[in-house]
Image (cartoon, rainbow, N blue to C red):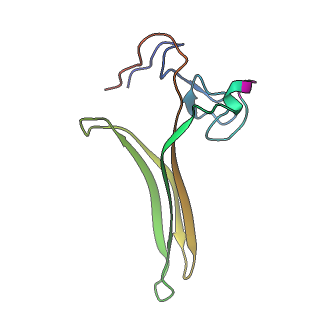
Amino acid sequence: MSSPRQGTPGATRDCPHCRETILESAAVCPACRHHIRFDVVAESDPATLTPLRIEGSFQQPPEGGACEYSVVVSIRNERGQEIARKLIGVGALGANEQRSFTLLVEMTPSKGKGKPSLRH
């Protein structure tokens, strides 16, 4: 995976709080929700879109024994090639236990200069 130049759309950096890779343009880390820098526009930016939001839950049937689960997110490009894959969490469910999840994709217009980086 190539890293775009600093200041270009898609450029990344590490969050100083949680060390996750985030967009350089982010004022708030989407992983740990700590503020990276003060940016009044970012807090109330109406241009932020959520083109995808999935909520769901899963549970173990009462008659079943314990079962294990893995939550994996995969990102594919327009050709169907996997460009990123991340294990989000693992665990086990006992009888009558339930887990809920929410998957969000947030998009904001890029404020960087130049062309967006092409990855893969």
Residue situated furthest left in the rendering: 79
Q: Can the viewer see residue 56 in this picture?
A: yes
Q: Nearer the viewer, residue 89 or 46?
A: 46
Which quadrant, please, contains the N terminus? Answer: top left
For this view, does 119 lie left or right of residue 93?
A: left
Q: How many marks?
A: 0
What residue is shown at x 43% (from left), y 52% (from top)?
72
Magenta-highlighted residues: 36-40
Residue situated furthest bottom in the rendering: 63
For this view, does 34 lie left or right of residue 111?
A: right
For this view, does 60 lie left or right of residue 45?
A: left
What residue is shown at x 67% (from left), y 41% (from top)?
32
Residue situated furthest front in the rendering: 46
Which quadrant, please, contains the C terminus? Answer: top left
**Residue 81 rendering spot, x and y as whole percentages:** 27, 37
For this view, does 47 lie left or right of residue 58?
A: right
Q: Nearer the viewer, residue 54 or 77?
A: 54
Based on the picture, tell me whether residue 118 belongs to the magenta stretch: no
**Residue 67 rendering spot, x and y as whole percentages:** 46, 74
What residue is shown at x 39% (from left), y 21% (from top)?
2
* Residue 90 vertical placement versus 59 (above, below): above
Magenta residues, dominant SS class = loop
What residue is shown at x 35% (from left), y 25% (from top)?
119
**Residue 87 rendering spot, x and y as whole percentages:** 46, 49
Q: Residue 116's image quarter?
A: top left
